[in-house]
Image (spheres, helix red, strand yellow):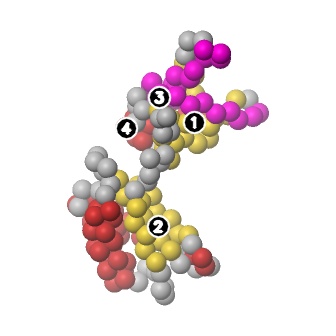
Amino acid sequence: MPTWPISSIRELLEPTLNHMGFELYALEQSGAGGRTLRVSIDHSEPITIEDCERVSRIAGPLLDHSELIDGPYDLEVSSPGAERPLRAHADYERFNGKRVNIRYRTGTSETVVEGPLVAVDSAGIAVSALGARGRAPVIVHIAWDDVVAGRLAVSI
């Protein structure tokens, strides 16, 4: 499997995508034989198929002319999805008030809490979780160092 310079690819694409009004949300090499470049884009409005096509039409030639990817490759452009991962502090701030699923450390083990994200600050986050057996919600405070993974959760 080839290894592509993902950080250089990010540096190449990011200014153009920003100029187009998009955020380069994620970039990864994947697929059979590692020959697929997955580009996830985001902006304040929902991402449409037309947005993905537009970015693909611009990103493809940029990548081809840069010679950062040796040989043939497939380019996939998509949105981060409804249950997008929350990776950066800014992601948590942006989605404060939304339903999240957070996996976090509690001592030597891990646990998961799901509910509305009710606070984000420099110390960590707070999630409103349902109390046991119909009891009132409980606010779970989680320090940044204890957050293992977070994502938006689809409300049902």
Give the Cα distance between marks 2 and 3. Answer: 28 Å
Cα separation between marks 3 and 1: 10 Å
| Mark 2 residue crowding within 10 angstroms, few (<14) / some (14–19) / many (20+) | some
At a point 42% along the width and 64% down the height, the residue shown is 39
Decide which of tag 4 and tag 1 comes sooner along the chain.
Answer: 4
How far apart marks 4 and 2 lie (CA) works out to 23 Å
Q: Is residue 138 visible?
A: no
Q: Residue furthest front?
A: 156
Q: Tell me which numbered mark, 2 or 1, is placed earlier along the sequence.
A: 2
Upstream in sequence: badge 2 or badge 3: 2
Range drawn in magenta: 108-134
Q: Is residue 48 above or below residue 105?
A: below
* Vertical side of 21 occupied by 30: above or below: below
**What type is the residue that disc 4 sits on?**
Arg
Residue 86's x, y, as percent?
48, 44
Reading the image, the residue beneath label 4 is 94
Q: Sequence-wise, which precedes: disc 3 or disc 1? A: 1
Q: How many residues crowd mark 4 within 10 Å: few (<14), some (14–19), many (20+)?
A: few
Q: Secondary structure at mark 2?
A: strand
- Dominant SS in magenta: strand
**Which residue in the protein does label 2 denote?**
38
Which of the labelled discs sits on residue 117, or is there none?
A: 3
The one of 85 and 68 positioned closer to us in this rendering: 85
Q: Is residue 99 magenta?
A: no
Q: CA distance from mark 4 to mark 3?
A: 10 Å
Q: Secondary structure at mark 4?
A: helix
Pointer 1: what residue? 102
